[in-house]
Image (cartoon, helix red, strand yellow):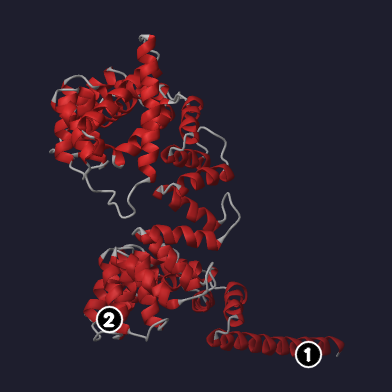
Amino acid sequence: MFCTDYNNFKKLVWLQIEHKIAMLGDMMASYAYACMDLYNKINRGETMKPKTVLKTKALATAFILLGLHLNSCKPKNEDKNKPNSLYQSLYKKSAKKGDAKAQYKLGLALYDAKGVEQNCKEAFNWFKKSAEQGNAKAQYNLGLMYFKGEGVEQNYKEAFNWFKKSAEQGDANAQHYLGTAYRNGYGVEQNYKETFNWFKKSAEQGNAKAKCSLGLMYCNGEGVERNYEEGISWLKKAAKQGDADAQNNLGLMYLKGAGVERNYTEAAGWYEKAAKQGDIIAQKSLSDMYYIGIGVEQNYKKALNWYKKLAEQGDAQAQYSLGVMYYKGLGVKQNYKEAMNWYKKAAERGIIQAQYGLWTMYEKGEGVKRDYKEAMNWYKKSAEQGNVIAQYYLGLMYYKGLGVERNYKEAMNWYKKAAEQGVIQAQHDLWTMYDKGEGVERDYKEAMNWYKKSAEQGNAIAQYYLGLMYYKGLGVKQNYKEALNWYKKSAEQGDAQAQYSLGVMYDKGEGVKQDRKGEAFNWYTKATRQGHSGAKTVLTKIFEEELINSSKNVKTSKKQRGNKNG
């Protein structure tokens, strides 16, 4: 019975390595290594004497049986991480004698902690010895250690040099890293053509990461003419091999319709594959798709699960989203305490919306006792980060003295910050303070300035007050035409006071031809319908005047007819 599967034999020899074959002695251990090396050559089809082939296969079978036997005899409490003597004998002896393959294997065992405690410095030394003898895999691993700064100080130039040596010998992993170095300018001048060249060599050998990178170069037109069809083809090849980055990028392309017809369902499918492999970007996209219901049926529970995975990994935006779901009871029973917990985590990481949610809860007393001081604290954090809404509310709290001593100057300071960024309510409150002289000397000109800013943004109240200031000449030269203009803008938006004021101007003929029965009557009527008492009073007088005039006209008419008849 002979073994004809080298991979199986290799696996079983590793069983021996991990357990107790070394108890048979260094000579036997070294013999096992030599046997495995010969079997590898047979497996590659190298020509050997028939007796050597027969002897090797026989020994291989013997070692397999021995490995199985020793595996079954493994002590129950054996420490898997404890270094064993086979590491010392099987690799180290050969490595010290200058065997490049043994040096590489020894470096790998030290790096991956196989049968020995991890030691990156020692691994680096053995990789270097092997690499200097031309071992391509050792060269790649040496480059990787320089690239990552493991066991040696990070050095992109050295990493590039060793990646290149390995890549030129055909190592697919090294080819991909070499392409990456050229793409990002790590240890070499950035060169997209060289990037494309090495990614392609690696991809053609089946390297999934290289296929993904090559696909993206085709899609972005980097180092090659843009070709979405070719790019997507390579991305799909990588994605089918399970490359999460390729799956995520395919999801993005189908989501945006870049190079393919937009297909939300297809996007969600690829995002899910990548998300299940732990790809954070895909998890974010997928959770949002379940939350909104794009490409998948809206499912708050699934959205909650994905947000939770991200939140537990420390993703601040997901922590905020999770807080929203607990706050609103989406996909989970409403729970203010949980909402506050997640809002707080996100707020402490600087998520402005979470800070807003947190101080809203403190202000309303949701899930916690109402606490204006704590609300004030979060308003301030958010306001100092530039949140305009928080700036406005912080001003309001200083203005009203909520959670802090009333302070008009501070109120004006925060109102002004929000007002300058277009918050209409802040502009309104600011010009009210200038108009009333609160925290500042009364200043109609400054009030006028803020009225105008707000009015020009379409605020009906500001438009009315701007009209009033032109009408009365406060902070500006009296101008009935301008007053009429701003009153009209406000009145057309339904402001009752502006409608009444507009009626007054038409009634008196101020800045416009007098038209009591037409335009004035029309605007008084509109204001009256909204409950404006002043407009109702004037309208009533107009009706009474009309009745009196009508009565006079009737009497005059009768008198005239009587005179004619007489």
Between circles 2 and 1, the one closer to the viewer is 2
Q: Classify 10 Å Cα crowding around label 1: few (below 14), some (14-19), many (20 and above).
A: few
| Residue 8 badge | none
> Is residue 27 placed above or below 444 in the rendered structure?
above
565 left or right, relative to 77:
right
Whichever of callouts 2 and 1 sits on the residue coming sooner in the sequence is 2
Front residue of 541 and 106? 106
On the image, which quarter does residue 419 sit in? bottom left
Left or right: where 435 falls relative to 50: left
Question: Which quarter of the rendering shows the C terminus?
Answer: bottom right
For label 2, the residue is 398
Is there any visible trace of residue 220 in the rendered image? no
Q: Measured along the vertical axis of the image, is residue 354 above or below residue 141?
A: below
Q: Label 1 belongs to which residue?
A: 559
Q: Residue at x 46, y 57 (%)?
A: 306
Element at badge 2? helix
Along the line of sight, the residue nearer the viewer: 86 or 347: 86
Residue farthest front in this picture: 24
Give the Cα distance between marks 2 and 1: 73 Å
Image x and y of residue 37, in percent: 31, 22
Pinpoint residue 516: horizontal percent, then vertical percent. 58, 77
Amino acid type, label 1: Lys
Residue found at the far right of this picture: 565
